[in-house]
Image: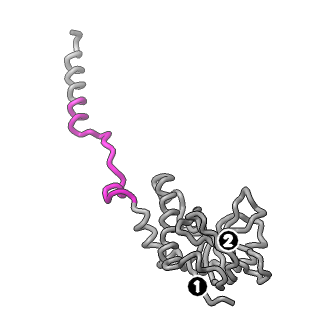
């Protein structure tokens, strides 16, 4: 053994012992994980009445103004019209709404029992992807907000019975980017059903 080798071995063993005890590389979980997995339903419930619905209501533009735009982005709207047709052949129920009074549909109101898309989430500028750990959480928030819309705006609504009724809607409109010539969709956050005209 060369001079000083014993000291190096001893020092090396000391370092190994320190690493084994101190474990400086231990990864501590982020604060969220100490409280359990992310709960999108609870997150949406906290936001719905306090922030989401007021934000959409305050930013809603008349549906006619949205219809005249070329944007396909999620836009808060208000509309007043008559349901001229209801399609509930699938769980993605749609009510065709005549807004202009000419007897022809101008909008497709989503009436469930399943709501598609991410429009509600995307219309809320205080919900950002960077607020979440991953894409799964971000997507789950969109689904949870849709569930809140079903539970509030569409609670107790029998979609098939809407035909012929006047409706007033506060919601979020968007167009399919691949089908700009088709009617816009609207997902409701508030829905008032009136009498038949």
Q: Which residue does the numbered mark 2 point to in the structure image?
A: 108
Where is residue 17? Give x, y as percent. Answer: 20, 31
Say whether residue 113 is visible. Answer: yes
Looking at the picture, tell me which residue is in the foreground, 47 or 149: 149
Location of the N terminus (image quadrant): top left
User: Residue 42, relative to residue 169: is it above or below?
Assistant: above
Task: Using the image, determine if residue 196 lies above or below residue 179.
Answer: below
Residue 70 left/right relative to 14: right
> Which residue is denoted by mark 1 in the rendering?
192
The reply to whether residue 119 is visible in this rendering is no
Secondary structure beneath disc 2? Answer: strand
Q: Residues within 10 Å of mark 2 (few under 14, many from 20)?
A: many
Between residue 194 and residue 77, name the one nearer to us.
194
Q: Can you give x and y, in whole percent of width and height, for residue 110 in the image?
A: 61, 70
Observer-nearest of 75 and 20: 75
Q: Is residue 142 magenta?
A: no
Q: Quadrant of the C terminus?
A: bottom right
Span shown in magenta? 15-38
Residue at image location 74% in from the left, 59% down from the top = 179
Secondary element at tag 1: strand
Residue 8, given in percent of the width and then of the height, sits at 24, 20
Looking at the image, do the residues carrying marks 1 and 2 touch, with CB atoms under 8 Å apart? no
Residue 117 lies in quadrant: bottom right
- At x 78%, y 72%, the residue is 68
Q: Is residue 124 left or right of residue 79?
A: left
Crowd band around label 1 with a 10 angstrom C-alpha radius: few (<14), some (14–19), many (20+): few
Residue 189, placed above or below residue 144: below
Image quadrant assignment for residue 177: bottom right
């Amino acid at each position: 053994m060369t001079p000083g080798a014993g000291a190096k071995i001893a020092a090396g063993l000391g370092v190994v012992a320190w690493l084994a005890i101190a474990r400086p590389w231990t990864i501590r979980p982020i604060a969220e994980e100490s409280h359990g997995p992310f709960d999108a339903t609870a997150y949406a419930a906290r936001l719905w009445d306090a922030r989401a619905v007021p934000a959409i209501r305050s930013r809603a533009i008349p549906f006619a103004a949205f219809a005249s735009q070329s944007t396909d982005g999620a836009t808060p709207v208000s509309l007043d019209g008559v349901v001229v047709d209801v399609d509930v052949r699938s769980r993605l129920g749609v009510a065709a709404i005549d807004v202009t009074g000419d007897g022809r549909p101008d909008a497709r109101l989503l009436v469930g029992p399943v709501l598609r898309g991410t429009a509600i989430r995307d219309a809320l500028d205080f919900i950002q992807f960077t607020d979440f750990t991953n894409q799964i959480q971000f997507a789950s928030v969109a689904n949870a907000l849709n569930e809140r819309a079903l539970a509030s705006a569409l609670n107790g609504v029998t979609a098939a019975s809407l035909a012929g009724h006047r409706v007033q809607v506060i919601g979020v409109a968007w167009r399919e980017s691949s089908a700009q010539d088709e009617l816009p969709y609207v997902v409701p956050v508030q829905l008032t059903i009136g009498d038949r005209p």
